Image (cartoon, rainbow, N blue to C red):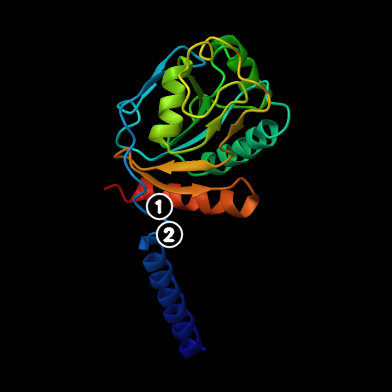
Amino acid sequence: MKRVQRSLRLATLIWLAAATVGCDKAPEELRDLGALPAWSFKTEQGVTVSDRSLAGKPWVANFLFTSCPTSCPPLAQATAKLQSRIGLWRPSTGPRIISFTVDPVTDSAEVLRTFARKYGADAKIWSFARADYAATDALVTRGFLQPLIRSDRRPDAPLTGVAATPTPIDTAHSMRFVLVDGSGTMRALYDSDPHSLARLDKALRWLYEHPR
């Protein structure tokens, strides 16, 4: 019996050692996808959120607008699920999710607060960010390197007349989550299906526990 107990203890120690080594291994999808430029937006609570305020901890970005009737509601639901996952392990000052509105004309702070309540956003984890359209377009397309194509704007046309009008509902924008590390470098892109959200949550936690 004692021999069996010793064997069980040894097997447990070996398993724990293997699990620890596995936790120290970076998720295979993490890459250096480029550094984000300096940026500064306002949240739905009127608080400034920027590259500086998020520095030092990894975070997640996505892009939506509240009047979008098709793709954005499922994206918001997926974000709520990601928030729940992160909430299971996140310390009080841990990683955050930032949803950037691509329709700042319609999405006032009040509209974003209503949208946040609808999807159960916890402002300590999940915030909504807005700036003028020119700054938004620049950050999304030239910073995050994600699409933002409006039906009322020709490719590469100036923003004259567009920046002051609501985003058309048939605007094409990214539906992916972008994982950013504490140095402001994009590390991976994820879809919103359950498997991808699980991988994103795991990678986010790894980056938090292994800062550069």
Identify the residue at image location x=62%, y=28%: 171
* In the image: residue 69, left or right of residue 23: right
Mark found first going from the N terminus, 1 or 2 = 2
Q: Which residue is mark 1?
A: 206
Q: Position of residue 49 (x, y in %)?
A: 39, 22
| 212 is higher (above) or lower (below) than 152 | below
How far apart are the alpha carbons under marks 1 and 2? Answer: 8 Å
* In the image: residue 78, left or right of residue 136: right
Q: Nearer the viewer, mark 1 or mark 2?
A: 2
- Whether residue 42 is visible here, answered yes or no, is no
Task: Give the tally of numbered discs.
Answer: 2
Q: Position of residue 20 (x, y in %)?
A: 39, 65
Q: Amino acid at mark 1?
A: Trp
Q: Secondary structure at mark 2?
A: loop
Identify the residue at image location x=48%, y=44%: 89
Q: Which sits in the foreground, 133 or 98?
A: 133
The residue carrying pointer 1 sits among few (fewer than 14), some (14 to 19) or many (20 or more) residues within 10 Å by Cα, namely some
Q: Amino acid at mark 2?
A: Pro
Q: Which mark is residue 19?
A: none
Q: Which mark is residue 27?
A: 2
Pointer 1 with pointer 2, Cβ within 8 A: yes
